[in-house]
Image (cartoon, grey):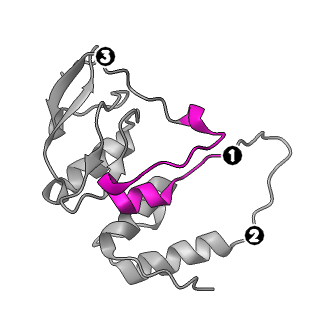
């Protein structure tokens, strides 16, 4: 069932990254195919195993789509986003110096302002590789990360 959303390539990619559905993104990236795969995946019936405990994860799609114009809504899940203290030290590293376990001190955005990764996000290998692949579409190619992480 198509919910009437019209997503451009960039918004679809940002949503796919936020939902961590990397297995659905085929290269070269084509929005209609990805939208179809996302809709199929989201419409599947899932039964949770009693052997595993699951917790809610809040994904704020509005922030991904609105970028710099985003005004957060207060929620009970504020603990999931750890705000950076203004006094915290940061280091500037280039795109290709990003490594797993680095924590972003600023948002990583596309040239159009779509937020791909929020400040406070701790990178993993998959995200680092995705950022390398998107080099030509990023707003800039050097980023602030919290101090204490070496780029080597």
Determine whether the residue tagged by mark 2 lies in a helix, strand or loop: loop
For the question of whether residue 114 can be seen, the reply is: yes
Q: Is residue 7 above or below residue 55?
A: below
Q: Nearer the viewer, residue 26 or 149?
A: 149
Quadrant containing the N terminus is bottom right
Determine whether the residue tagged by mark 1 lies in a helix, strand or loop: loop
For the question of whether residue 151 can be seen, the reply is: no
* Image-quadrant location for residue 56: top right
Question: What residue is shown at x 13% (from left), y 47% (from top)?
Answer: 140
Can you identify the residue that label 1 sits on?
Answer: 56
* Image-quadrant location for residue 99: top left
Circle 1 crowding by C-alpha within 10 Å: few under 14, some 14–19, many from 20? few
Can you identify the residue that label 3 sits on?
Answer: 88
Distance of mark 3 from mark 1, alpha carbons? 29 Å
Determine whether the residue tagged by mark 3 lies in a helix, strand or loop: loop
Can you identify the residue that label 2 sits on?
Answer: 45
Q: Nearer the viewer, residue 18 or 28?
A: 18
- N-terminal of the pair, mark 1 or mark 2, is 2
- Could you tell me residue 141's position as x and y percent? 13, 44
Q: Is residue 10 above or below residue 126?
A: below
- Could you tell me residue 63's position as x and y percent? 42, 55
Part of the protein shown in magenta: 56-80
- Could you tell me residue 62's position as x and y percent? 46, 60
- N-terminal of the pair, mark 3 or mark 1, is 1
Q: Is residue 98 magenta?
A: no
Question: Quick check: marks 1 and 2 in contact, CB under 8 Å?
Answer: no
Quadrant containing the C terminus is top left
Please give left or right for residue 84 compared with residue 109 in the image.
right
- Could you tell me residue 97's position as x and y percent? 18, 32
Distance of mark 2 from mark 3, alpha carbons? 44 Å
Question: Quick check: marks 3 and 1 in contact, CB under 8 Å?
Answer: no
Q: Nearer the viewer, residue 28 or 31?
A: 31
């Amino acid at each position: 069932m198509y919910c009437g959303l019209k997503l451009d390539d960039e918004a679809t990619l940002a949503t796919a990254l936020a939902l961590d559905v990397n297995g659905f993104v085929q290269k070269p990236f084509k929005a209609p195919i990805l939208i179809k795969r996302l809709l199929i995946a989201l419409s599947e019936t899932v039964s949770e195993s009693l052997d595993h405990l699951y917790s809610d994860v809040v994904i704020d799609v509005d922030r991904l789509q609105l970028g710099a114009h985003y005004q957060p809504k207060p929620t009970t899940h504020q603990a999931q986003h750890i705000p950076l203290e203004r006094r915290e030290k940061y280091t500037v590293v280039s795109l290709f110096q990003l490594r797993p376990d680095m924590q972003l001190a600023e948002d990583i955005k596309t040239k159009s302002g779509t937020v791909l990764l929020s400040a406070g996000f701790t990178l993993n290998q998959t995200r680092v590789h995705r950022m390398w692949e998107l080099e030509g579409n990023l707003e800039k190619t050097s980023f602030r990360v919290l101090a204490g992480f070496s780029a080597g």
